[in-house]
């Protein structure tokens, strides 16, 4: 049984015991040697003869599925599946699974890494100090500030917990918000417009879909407080990068932390030239603990489906 494995952190020499578990199921494994998410045309030749597929951040479109008639399961290595055409998979009887919750701590912690990097100018001061400079800049403390969390799922809840540790005021917007959880944990429930107008920090933890694409745009940024800092560790298309750049240049936004981009890997962007913009290469889930959990769960999902066993974490029932 042939299986394609594309996540960059689940490759020979990096996959450890999780890959050993997959090899016990099948020795016929194809890997992604490009070191980046795959386009349609890059993916099809590798996937055409496969029945199983452990998917990274590749673009798994209808065109891909049409070209791969043997495919039975797409096991997402991660929670998001916006790059998988779910309707096409359902029509073709291809099971799609994911690994919810396993990377929540990792992504939530990176969110605060980006917040600190911006509020204390850590990357800039690091480079200045290495260059022999002794630069003095005034930063911003988190205590007493308001953080607005868009999407109060597993990752959003980690961010909320961390924010409470800094004695921040935590508010949240989520179309499916858990009122009981918010009341128990002292989280204010807000509408979208209330959240963007009341927050000093906005942290994005939403899926990318027609409703959320470019949710952060010139109009919504205009409703924010001057100096608001936006952190996106979810999906790049939620932020209109050109609008964000203009707002950074004008001073409307106080900073921007991006772990996700509209195009990945991103092309050269004017955002990269701005000191109060900190970017990372979609690395939120890349901790030792999270990658091990995602690897084991995605492999178990795939093996269970292909073995005819009972499986969970299906996203296209």
Image: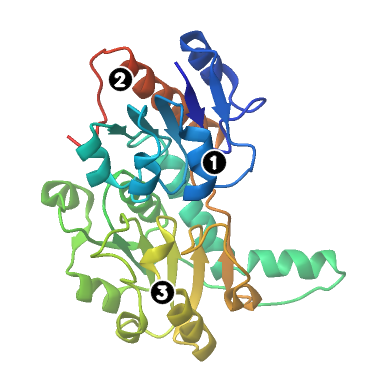
Query: Which numbered marker is on residue 286?
Result: 1
Left or right of 102? Residue 215 is left
Estimate the x, y position of residue 294 in percent, counting from the top left. 44, 31
Q: What residue does disc 2 label?
A: 305
| Residue at image coords 43%, 35% | 77
> What secondary structure is marked by label 3?
loop
Question: Looking at the image, which is closer to me, 136 or 223?
Answer: 223
- Does any portion of residue 76 appear in the rendered image? yes
Estimate the x, y position of residue 271 in percent, counting from the top left. 58, 75
Write down the quadrant of residue 144 in the picture.
bottom left
Q: For the residues marked 1 and 2, what is the alpha-carbon distance in whole angstroms?
A: 26 Å
Quadrant location of the N terminus in the rendered image: top left
User: Are the residues tagged 1 and 2 within 8 Å (C-beta)?
Assistant: no
Residue farthest along the top direction in this orientation: 24
Residue 272 to residue 285: above or below: below
How is the protein colored in the picture?
rainbow
| Residue at image coords 63%, 71% | 268
Q: Nearer the viewer, mark 1 or mark 3?
A: 3
> What secondary structure is marked by label 2?
helix
Q: For the residues marked 1 and 3, what is the alpha-carbon distance in whole angstroms?
A: 25 Å
Q: For the residues marked 3 and 2, what is the alpha-carbon distance in whole angstroms?
A: 38 Å
User: Are the residues tagged 1 and 3 within 8 Å (C-beta)?
Assistant: no
Q: Nearer the viewer, mark 1 or mark 2?
A: 2
* Of the image marks 3 and 2, the number of the one nearer the N terminus: 3
Residue 227 to residue 11: above or below: below
Quadrant location of the C terminus in the rendered image: top left
Query: Which numbered marker is on residue 240?
Result: 3
């Amino acid at each position: 049984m042939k299986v394609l494995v594309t996540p960059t952190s689940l490759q020979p020499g990096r996959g450890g015991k999780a890959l050993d578990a997959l090899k016990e199921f099948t020795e016929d494994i194809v890997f992604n040697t490009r070191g980046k998410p795959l386009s349609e045309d890059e993916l099809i030749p590798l996937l055409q003869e496969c029945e199983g597929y452990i998917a990274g951040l590749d673009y798994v479109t209808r065109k891909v599925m049409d070209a791969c008639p043997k495919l039975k399961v797409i096991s997402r290595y991660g929670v998001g599946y916006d790059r998988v055409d779910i309707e096409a998979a359902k029509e073709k009887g291809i099971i799609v699974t994911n690994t919810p919750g396993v990377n929540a701590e990792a992504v939530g912690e990176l969110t605060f890494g980006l917040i600190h990097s911006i509020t204390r100018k850590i990357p800039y001061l690091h480079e200045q100090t290495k260059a022999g400079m002794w630069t003095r800049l005034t930063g911003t403390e988190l205590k007493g500030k308001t953080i607005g969390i868009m999407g109060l799922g597993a990752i959003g809840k980690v961010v909320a917990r961390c924010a409470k540790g800094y004695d921040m005021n935590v508010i949240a917007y989520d179309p499916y918000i858990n009122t009981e959880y918010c009341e128990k944990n002292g989280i204010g429930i807000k509408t979208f417009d209330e959240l963007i107008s009341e927050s000093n920090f906005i942290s994005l933890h939403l899926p990318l879909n027609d409703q959320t694409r470019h949710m952060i745009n010139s109009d919504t940024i205009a409703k924010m407080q001057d100096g608001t800092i936006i952190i996106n560790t979810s999906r790049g298309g939620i932020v209109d990068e050109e609008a964000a750049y203009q707002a950074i240049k004008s001073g409307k936004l106080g900073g921007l932390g991006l772990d996700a981009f509209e195009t990945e890997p991103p092309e050269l962007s004017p955002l990269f030239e701005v000191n109060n913009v900190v970017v990372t290469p979609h690395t939120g889930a890349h901790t030792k603990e999270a990658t091990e959990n995602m690897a084991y769960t995605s492999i178990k999902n795939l093996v269970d489906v292909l073995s005819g066993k009972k499986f969970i974490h299906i996203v296209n029932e």
